[in-house]
Image (spheres, coloured by chain):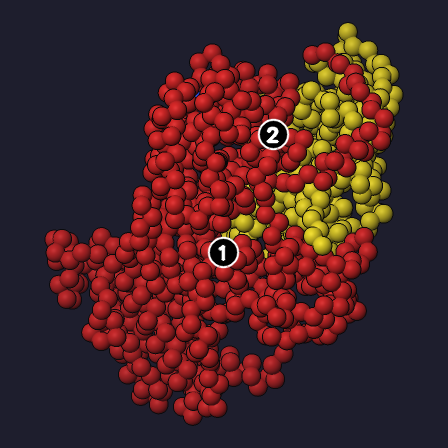
Chain colours: A yellow, B red
Amino acid sequence: MTMALTHLQRLEAESIHIFREVAANFSKPVMLYSVGKDSSVLMHLAMKAFYPAKPPFPFLHVDTTWKFREMIAFRDQMAEKLGFDLLVHVNEDGVRDNINPFDHGSNVHTHVMKTVGLRQALDKYGFDAAFGGARRDEEKSRAKERIFSFRNASHAWDPKNQRPEMWNIYNTRIAAGESIRVFPLSNWTELDIWQYILQEDIPIVPLYFAKERPVVERDGMLILKDDDRMKLRPDEVVENRLVRFRTLGCYPLTGAIESSADTLEAIVGEMLTARTSERQGRLIDRDEAGSMEKKKREGYF
Amino acid sequence: MRHVPAKTLEPSNEVRDYLAAQEKKSLLRFLTCGSVDDGKSTLIGRLLSDTKQIFEDQLAALERDSRKHGTTGEDVDFALLVDGLEAEREQGITIDVAYRFFATPKRKFIVADTPGHEQYTRNMATGASTADLAIVLVDARQGVLRQTRRHSIIASLLGIRHIVLAVNKIDLVGFDRVTFDRIVAEYRDFARDLGFESIMPIPMSARYGDNVSARSERLAWYQGPTLIEHLETVPVGSASAEQPFRFPVQYVNRPNLDFRGFAGTIASGSISRGDEVVVAKSGRSAHVKRIVSYGGDLQKAIAGQAVTLVLDEEVEVSRGNMLVQPDARPQVSDQFAANLVWFDEQALLPGRSYILRTETDEASATVTELKHRLNINDFGEEAAKSLEMNEVGVVNISTRTPIAFDAFAENRSTGAFILIDRITNATVGAGMIQHALRRAENIHWQSLDIDKRARSDMKHQRPAVFWFTGLSGSGKSTIANLLEKKLAATGRHTYLLDGDNVRHGLNRDLGFTDADRVENIRRVAEVAKLMTDAGLIVLVSFISPFRAERRLARELMAGGEFVEVFVDTPFEECARRDPKGLYARALRGEIKNFTGVDSPYEPPENPEIRLQTIGRTVEEMVDILDDWLAERDKAETQYESGGGI
Ligand SMILES: Nc1nc2c(ncn2[C@@H]2O[C@H](COP(=O)(O)OP(=O)(O)OP(=O)(O)O)[C@@H](O)[C@H]2O)c(=O)[nH]1
Ligand SMILES: [Mg+2]
């Protein structure tokens, strides 16, 4: 009898191998937990990789203080349910200077609260490897990144000088202060992620499902007014519309799409006929061409 | 922007059917390679676009980008879909491999778009290492070039068995059949010995799309499949399931005293509950009690699955070992022959110590012999002393501890390794094992009754190696000499190995090239090790200019026995003293490869002892060394009488 692995089984096995490789080689790994659907899948894979043990590393959420409230609630609920060790880091300097997406724009906000916040957290705990949920199909500079992606002592990525990555033999050696970002979902596509969530029945933040929500149309995007920190401009009105999110981040920077897809099947059905990419809903990628690469060179995930 | 309410809420079972069909598709991993500018990235961009992977917002961005960076005038430049790094877009070339995904109704594909530039060959190798098929592009105007050949050879060595010879830019030669036939003949002739199972030549135009996904009227003379048709039907090997069982142990999962599981990915073959397995390195056997997975225990698991095995007996297994089929075991050896592709700007030096890594194992390794280098143009074998960046050779490798492996030709997972530089941690080479060397199998370690401890106890001392390094004329031999006298005077048994003297005997065959210097030090380090085994205090006085070799020497010795003594005299001072008149001659250009003049000296970063010689007498310095030894021995005695841990 010949059995062959299905597509998702192959992807799952590769990710599990990557998780174990990190656990075996690094003294202080951490998983970057961003609460989105990719993080949910990542977390599920981590549980599988070390079963019956718990994942031998903590989960870190770099909280920009502008995440959707439902994300924070979901995060705390998952931490309790799965019993993992959750670390939350906020860039207090940014909070003190009241850095926010409305006054400072997405670039400055993301840099200070996310990129710098992440660097602070990594330095504070001295993590030598950090898992992220990035996929190569998300963006063209991500498509260029290794699964084990080397970072120098100031967390910078040097895209022109990456280590060769042969077969599934990963070079995990680093000097003091240096670190590796590890991307177990490198070879997954957006469709794979949804399909896996469906197959494995993985919990995700309800914001991915369509529901009537109070949104404001601004700069060509539908922004959910998640709290009172968002001030309306003179010509703006809050409307209740049937919307959902394809990707989640800071609420003022994340556009909703009009949709009535309220089940996973419907989401996948919608995705199959989608005409725009998922990052379209993120203001940060549109700021300037090559912006993702630039952020990554500075230490963004 | 308009908010188009995303339409089509298909009934959910239709979606489920669609997804089920996705799951059954086979996967083909391939790469594009070939010389600079032959159209690799353009072809991938075209494939992505033809298979509808590009969204509207991305197409809009592509049009903007093409106006800014494009190399195609008014048309969109499909290469910009894949050349995603700023530097790539600015220079119009590919620097690093891009991984992209697409699917057709028949198959899923992961494609690696690799760079044509020779400088970035290692990135091509990265993309090729996980591929089953290579599309080798040739510019119809240029024909087969040096990089076409280099990439084909690397693809062959990395185990790729299927080639598509894409004769591209056929539009620029008037869709000419004669040109096509000539290039195909030339390539087939070159590739005859590369062991490819299939070579499928296709004339095409990546830029205009002829024969990519659609047949072209302009190429009516061509009867074969389009590129997509071929990619959809070429057989992909799932042979690994039929091979002997191999399970490289990646991680020992031990959450509590009741559970001890060996986690890993099955490299080949399959395993069922109750099967007998053998630990490759020890030969101990046990049976599989459980195949643990998150969703519940499995009855059987096959190649490619990541599982956790629990055995019925307590056998010693740790990361780097392998669980294998009892009647078809891998080789276990510390010496083997391999093909090696070199990636690093610093050439491969036989004798230098590197870190060798397989999927889960790691060992110190040296290339003991560079048998030959491959000539990229005619695949011929040439003699060589070192391998430069992007060169390919056949080598013998010796590891400090044995590893378990199969021949790469039989098993791509268990026959591969990488080499890592000990100092920079760079991945400097990739190897494909051919076979174990007989001599390793035949020479077994003799276990002797009179051991190191017995020998040193008789001498009432603990062995040590004082390794004096420093420029020529820095004072190494003078200090070592006096230290030996002093130690001898207090009844210690010593031996002094001096660079000049050893070169008259043991190392008389070696010169002063980098490769010979490395070998020089390797031999001396081995001799020093034997002497510590004899219980002696060894004084080694060698310039030993390279950190890597001093590190090798350090790692040979037992913990606490290696004392690196940096005899730190500035170059100017050595040249001024010039006791043998050598600096004067080197500076006049009469001596080549003279350390400090035209050959580098890498000072130690963390020597046990640093002797700044200026302003100190030799006696003072010898006292420092003697005191150091006394301190060490005192510390050790305390530790031993303390009863250990
Ligand atoms: N006329 C014509 N031009 C082509 C064709 N394919 C590619 N080109 C052009 O050739 C140039 C180089 O194409 P690329 O796709 O960047 O080449 P490459 O092989 O990826 O180059 P490197 O990755 O840097 O080695 C571009 O200007 C393309 O538009 C073709 O079939 N016909
Ligand atoms: Mg290219």
What's under tag 1, amino acid-wise? Ala
What residue is drawn where x is 80% and y is 41%? A199
Picture coordinates of residue B262, whole percent (x, y): 69, 63
In this figure, which residue is indicated by the disc labeled 2?
A139
Instruction: Looking at the picture, tell me which residue is in the foreground, A278 or B465.
Output: A278
Q: Which residue is mark 1?
A: B409
Judged left or right of residue B587, residue A33 is right
User: Cβ of disc 2 within 8 Å of ligand 2?
Assistant: no
Residue A300, percent from left and from top: 60, 35
Residue contact between numbered discs 1 and 2, judged by CB atoms under 8 Å: no
Q: Which residue is nearer to you in this view: B400 or B213?
A: B213
Q: Nearer the viewer, residue B483 or B624?
A: B483
Crowding near the residue tagged with mark 1, few <14, some 14–19, many ≥20 C-alpha atoms within 10 Å: some
Quadrant (top left, top right, bottom left, bottom right) of the N terminus of chain A: bottom right
Residue B165 point in image, percent of width and height: 45, 34
Q: Residue at x 59, y 68 (%)?
A: B328
Indicate which label's residue lies in the foreground, 1 or 2: 1
Chain letter of the residue carrying label 1: B
The crowding category of the residue bearing disc 2, from other C-alpha atoms within 10 Å (few below 14, some 14 to 19, many at least 20), is many
Where does the image place residue B34, in percent across and percent down from the top left? 42, 35
Q: How many marks?
A: 2
Q: Which part of the image, by quadrant, shows the C terminus of chain A?
A: top right
| Residue occupying the point 57% across, 30% down | B228
**Is residue B66 among the parts visible in the rendering?**
no
Q: Is residue B381 visible?
A: yes
Which of the 4 quarters of the picture holds residue B368?
Answer: bottom left
Q: Secondary structure at mark 2?
A: loop
Q: Is residue A292 above or below residue B553?
A: above
